[in-house]
Image (tube, helix red, strand yellow):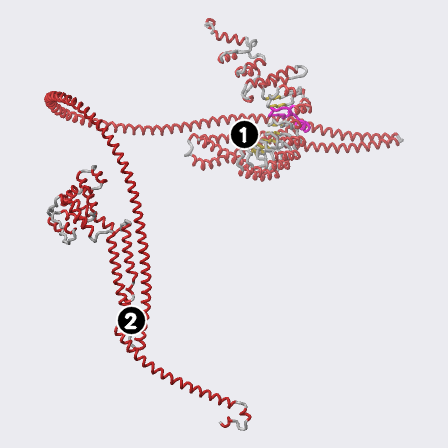
Amino acid sequence: MSRLEESLNINAQASREARILARRKRIQERLATAHQGESSGGKEGEKKEEVGKGKQQIIESKRRLYRVKHRTEQDVTSVRIGGDEREQQHRINEEKTRQELRAKLLAEAEQSARNNASVAMRWADLFSIEVPQDLYDEIEKQRQACERIINSKDKLIADIKTELKKKDDEFVKTLKRQAENIDTLLQYMSRQFVEMQSAYKNELEEIENAFLQERSDLLDSNRGEIQELFDKRSKLEQDFMDRYLSTVENYQQQLEALRIADAEDYHILKIRLETDIQNLEQHLEAMRATYQLNTEKLDYNYRVLVERDHENQTTINQQKRKISRQRDVLSSLKQRYAESEKKYMEENMKLTDEYKRITEQFKDLQSKFRHFEQVDTNKYNEVFSMKEREVAGVVKQLLQADKVLHEQQLGWDWLPPHESVFTPSLPSSSFAAAKAAQEEGNKEDADEVETEEEIKARMGEAEVQDSLKDPRNNGALSLLCDEAGFLIDAKIRSMLDKLSKDEAGQVKAESVLRSLGVFDGSSFNALMDALTASSTIEMRAKGMTVPARRISGNADGGQVPVLVHPDDVVKRLKAFIEVESTTPARGGIGGAAARVAGVSRRAAEVEQEYWARMSNVINEKGTRVWGVLEKQLEKYKGLLQERSASLSEVESLQHQNTELRALLNQYLTSRINSELVVPPTVLI
Amino acid sequence: MNAPFIVPPLKDLCVTVVAGNFEENPTFGPLPDKYVKKVVEILPIDLPLELAGTAIIDEEYWKRRCLSRWKNMEAAPHAGSWKQLYFEKNLEDAMEQYDAALNNMDDLKRLMTYSRKFIQTVRLRQLPSHMDLTDMFECMINSPSALAVHYSLKNVGMEYDRSLFGMKLADCRTLAKCLEKSETLTYLDLSNNGLDDDKVRMLASGLVENLSITHLNLSHNKVADRGVRALAKLLDSKSVITMLELQDNQIHVEGAKSLARAFKSNQALVSVNLRLNRMGDEGCKVVCDALKSNNSLERFNLGSNSAGAETVSALVPLIRLSQSLIELDLSCNSFGPKGCEQIRKAVEQNTTLQIMDIRQCGAELDEESAISENLRARQEKRDRAKIVGRA
C-alpha cells in the first residue's frame, strides 16, 4: 500500500521534475534568442567588414555549439545534482531519524529500568505474604508487570524492525532510483552525444558552405579583376602594335631615301678620288726625279765635307797644343800676379790704418774747437745779457722819473716811448741764428743729409736723367766719354762689359757726370755749355765775370751746337769744375762758414743800434724842460723853507700858552683855596 | 591455386625462420627496419613477457597482444603506448588476483621488478589479499608515478561481507611508511576505501614527509573533523599539493575551520573539491573568507554543503575580487533568491570566471540563466577575440 503510494509519489515527483526541466528549457531558449538578437544586432554589424564570411560563420557556429553543449551538459549534470540533493536530504533525514530512535531507545531503557526496579522491589514484599491466594495474586501482578515491560521492549523491537524494513525498502528503492538515474543519465548522455554530433555536423557543413561561398565570391571577384586586367593588357598590346607598325614603315621610308642619297654621294666621291689618284701619281713621278737629283748632289757634298773635316781635325790638334802652351804661360803669370797683389794688399792695409788714425785726430781737434767756441759764446752771452739787464733797469728808472716829472710837476700827459725800444734788443735771437748756422754746418760734416736737400738732389738727378736721354746731347756726351774715360769708376767699368752698347754708353756718361759733380739740371746745362766751342768758361775760371750765355736760347735754336775740339775737352772740364766750385750756391763747409760770419755781423749791427736807442731814450726837448724845472723848483724850495721857520715859531708860542693855562688850573684847584675866606673861584 | 608453384623469396623465408626461432635467439641483429617489422608481424603473442619487453618495441605487436587478451582497450589513458598498457594491465591483474595461499610472492615480485621500466600508473580496483604494498614500492623503485588503490572485492554476489571492503589500519600504516620514502609518486587515489579519522591520520603522518604528491584524492570516504585537521596540517606553505579532492565525506564545521586556516597560508592549491559534506553555513563562510587571501586557486567546488545566507556574504567579495578563479560549483545549497541575486551581481563584476554552477540553490530561474548567459557571452567574446586575433 505504502509502496504504491510511494511509487505514485515518485512518479509525481519525477513528472514534477520533468515539468520544471521543461519550463527551465523554455525560459532559457527564450532568453537565448533575445540575447542572440541583441548581440547579433550590435556586435556583428561592426565586425562583419573586418572578418571574412568563413570566420564569421566559425564564430557563429562556436556560439551555437557552446550553447548546445552548455544545455546538454546541464541536462547531464542535472542528474548528478539531483542525486546530490536527494542524498543530502536523505542524510539529513537519516540523522534526524537516528537521533529520534536513539532518544526513543534511551527513554525506553529508562522506563524499563524503572519498571524493573519496581518489580524487583515487589519481589522482596512477596516473601512477607503468607496467604497463598494473595501470593498468587501478587505473583500474577508481578508477572503482568514483567509482561508489560517485555511488551514495551517488544514494541520497541518491532518499531526498530519496521524501521529496518523501511530502510530495506528504501535501499531497494534507492537502488531502483539509482538504476533509473543511470538510465536517464545514459539517455541524456546519448542524447547529448547525438545532439552534439548533429550540431557539429551541421555547423561543419555551414562553415564549409560559408567558406565555399567566400571562396566562390573571392574567385568571382578575382576572375573579374583578372579579366579586366587582361582586357587592359590586350588593349595596350594592340596600341603598341599599331604604333610599332607605323614607326617601322616610317623608318623604312627614311632608310630608302638615305640609301639613294648615299649612292649618289658615293658616285661623285669615287670620280673625284680617281682623278686625285691620277694627279698624285704624276706628282709622285716628278718628285722621284727630283729626289734622284738631290741624292747625287748630296753625295758630292758629303764627300767634300769629309775632306774638310780631315783638315779641320789637323788644325784642331795644332790649336790644342797651342792652348796647352798658353795655359802654362797663364799659370806663371797668375802666380806673379798673386804675389804682387799680396804685396799691394799689405801696403794698402798699412795706409788705411794711417788714414784712420789721422781722421781720428782730426775729429778730436774739431770737437775741441767746437767745445771752446761753445764756451766762449756762452760767456759772451752771459756778459751781454747782464749788461743789458742793467741798462734796462737804468732806462726804466729814467723813464719813471720822466713820467713823474711830466705828470706831477708839469701836469702834462706823459707818453711812454714805444715798446719796441726795449724788446727788439733781444741779443739771444742773433745768437740763436748763429748757433743754427753752426749746427747746419755740423750736420753736413756728419754727412747727414736733410730731407729737403735729399728731395732736391733727387729732383736734380731726375733732371740729369732726362737730359741724358735727350738725343741732342748725344754728341757732347759721347765726346765726354771718349776723352774723359779716366773718370769712370773701376766698378762700373767691370759692369760695362756685361751691358749692351746703348746701355753701356748711358752708364758711362752717368758715371762721368757723377764724378764731375753734376747732380742737377742747371749744372748739367752749364757743363753742356762748357763743352760748346763758343764757351767763355775758361775766362770765367780765371776770375773774369763774363755773363754766361743763355742756354735756353741755344736749346730754342734747335740746332746741335758746335762742340769743342776733343783736345781741349780736358781743359774745359777743369775750368768748369773750378767755376762750379766757386759758385756760392754750392753746398759745403766754406758756404756754411760764410753764412755764420754773415749772421754775426748782422747781430753786431743790431746791438749797436740798440745801444744808440738806449742812450737816446729822453730826447732834447725833455732835457731842456728838465733844466727849467730844476731852476723853478730851487726857488720854490727856498720859499717853503722860510714858511717852515715861521711855522715852528708859532708852534712854540702855542706851547707856552698851554703850559701857562695848566699852571693856572693847578693853582685854582689846590686845597689852599678852600681854606681861604674868599676862594679865588668865587672871584673869577 | 598457383601459389604452391611460386617459390617464396629468400627474404621471406629468412623472416619466417627468424620469427620462428625468436624465442631461442631473441635478437634482430643488424636486420634492416623493414624486415624487423615483418618479423614482428608474425611473431607469436605468447612470447615470455620478460623477453618480449626487452626485445620488442613495436607498438603493433603490443596492440595485437593487448586486444587478444582484453576487450575494449584504449591506449590514450596510458600515454598512448600499447606496451605500457599491456604491462600495467598485466601487473594490475596479477596483483588483483593475488592470493597468498595460491600464488608465490616471489613470482609477483619478479614481475614487478621487470615491469618497472614500462609502468607509470598502478590502478588496483580490488585488493582482497590486503598485501603489503611495501613490496611493491621496493620492487619498483622510482617507477610508479600514479597509484590508485581500492580495497574492495568485485562480483561478490551473495557472499557479501562488510569486512571485505575498506582499508584496514595496518594497510594504512604500511602505505604511510611507503609514502615517506617514495620520491616519484605524484598521484595518490584512495577514494572509496572507508577511511575514517584514525586511518587518515595514519596516512597523513606518512604524507608529511612526502614532497612529491601533487594530486591527493580521498573522496567517498568517512573522513570527519579530526582527519581533516590532520590533512590541514599538510597544507602548510611548503606543501606541493595542487589538487585536493575531499568530496562525499563527513566534514563538519570544525573541519571546515581547520581547512580555512590552512588555505590562508597555502599558495600551491589549484583545485579543491569539498562537494557533499556537512560543513553547514558557518563552515562554508569560514572557508570562503579564507580563500579571499588566496590568489592561486582556480577550481573550487562547494556543492551540497547546506550553505546559507552567511556564506553568501563571504562569497560575494570572493567572487568579485578574485583574479584566479575559473570554475566555481555552488550547486545544492540554500542561498535563497536574494543570495542568488547578490551572487549574480558579483559574477557580473568578475572577469576570470568561466564556469559557474548555482542550480538547486533556491535561485529564480531568471537569475540562473542570467549568470549562465553572462558567462556564455564572456566565453563568446573570448572565442571571437581568439579567432579575430588569429585572423
Taking the image as drawn, is residue A274 in sight? no
Q: Which comes before the other along the chain, label 1 or label 2?
A: 1
* Disc 2, SS: loop
Amino acid under disc 1 = Glu
Q: Position of residue A583 (x, y in %)?
A: 20, 52
Q: Position of residue B182 (x, y in %)?
A: 63, 24
In the picture, the disc for residue A416 is 2
Residue pushed farthest right?
A130
Amino acid under disc 2 = Pro
The answer to which quarter of the image holds residue A490 is top left
Q: Which residues are magenta?
A: B178-203
Label 1 belongs to which residue?
Answer: A73
| A49 with respect to B130 (left or right) | left
The answer to which quarter of the image holds residue B53 is top right
Disc 1 to disc 2, C-alpha distance = 159 Å
Dot 2 alpha-carbon crowd within 10 angstroms: few under 14, some 14 to 19, many 20 or more: few
Front-lying residue, A494 or A119: A494
Does B199 lie within the magenta span? Answer: yes
Mark 2 belongs to chain: A
